[in-house]
Amino acid sequence: MSCLRVLVADDHPVCRTLLTHLFSAFDCSVTAVADAHEAMALAQAYDVICLDRNMPGLDGPSAARGLRGQAFLVACTSQQEGLEDQFEAVLAKPVSCGAVADVVALALTWLGNRAAAASVIPSPACDAA
């Protein structure tokens, strides 16, 4: 299993809940916060930071600039253009279980755990989320 520590920052409670369930289906330990300021304050404790592109106050791309190199950064957005240089991966909304599986595998590879990355497959718990 992955055992990644994932921080989700999204101002929409339904998106936070969905992402929490989807990452949890891959045995990730997930914390969800409502804004990027909170994410930046907590960032050092996480392997993966998933940021909504459009949050009030500090948006995802602005937060990513401050977090670069601290964790595997994932943008979560319906507007994907222009993010490739700021994030290691992009989750397109609406988010699917398969897309989260891909992100978990990429993050594990980025963190140097290729063996675990090769074993990431969607679980039945994904379908329930």
Image (spheres, rainbow, N blue to C red):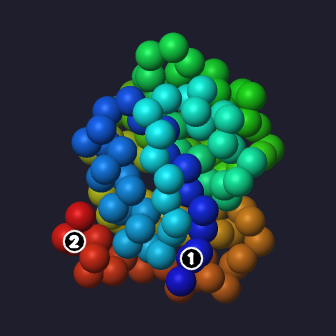
**Residue type at mark 2?**
Asp
Provide residue 94's location: percent of width, then percent of height: 27, 44
Q: Is residue 18 visible?
A: yes
Q: Nearer the viewer, residue 74 or 14?
A: 14
Q: Is residue 83 above or below residue 16?
A: above
Residue 127 vertical placement versus 115 (above, below):
above
Q: Residues within 10 Å of mark 2 (few under 14, many from 20)?
A: few
Residue under label 2, please give it.
Answer: 127
Disc 1 residue type (three-letter): Ser
Q: Please tell me which residue is depicted at 51% across the width and 69% down the height of the picture.
A: 28
Which picture quadrant has residue 58?
top right
Mark 1 to mark 2 CA distance (whole Å): 18 Å
Residue 36: horizontal and vertical position, in percent?
Answer: 56, 29
Q: SS of the residue at dot 2? A: helix
Secondary structure under the numbered disc 1 in the rendered image: loop
The residue identified by callout 1 is: 2
> In this rendering, does residue 90 appear at all?
no
Report x, y in % for residue 11: 38, 30
Q: Please, which residue is most extreme toward the top here?
A: 57
Which quadrant of the structure image shows residue 16? top left
Residue at image point 23% right, 64% down: 129
Q: Is residue 45 left or right of residue 19?
A: right
Looking at the rendered structure, the number of numbered marks drawn on it comes to 2
Query: Badge 1: how crowded within 10 Å, few (<14), some, or many (20+)?
Result: many
| Residue drawn at point x = 68 percent, y = 44 percent | 43
Question: Is residue 43 left or right of 92 when viewed as pictured?
Answer: right
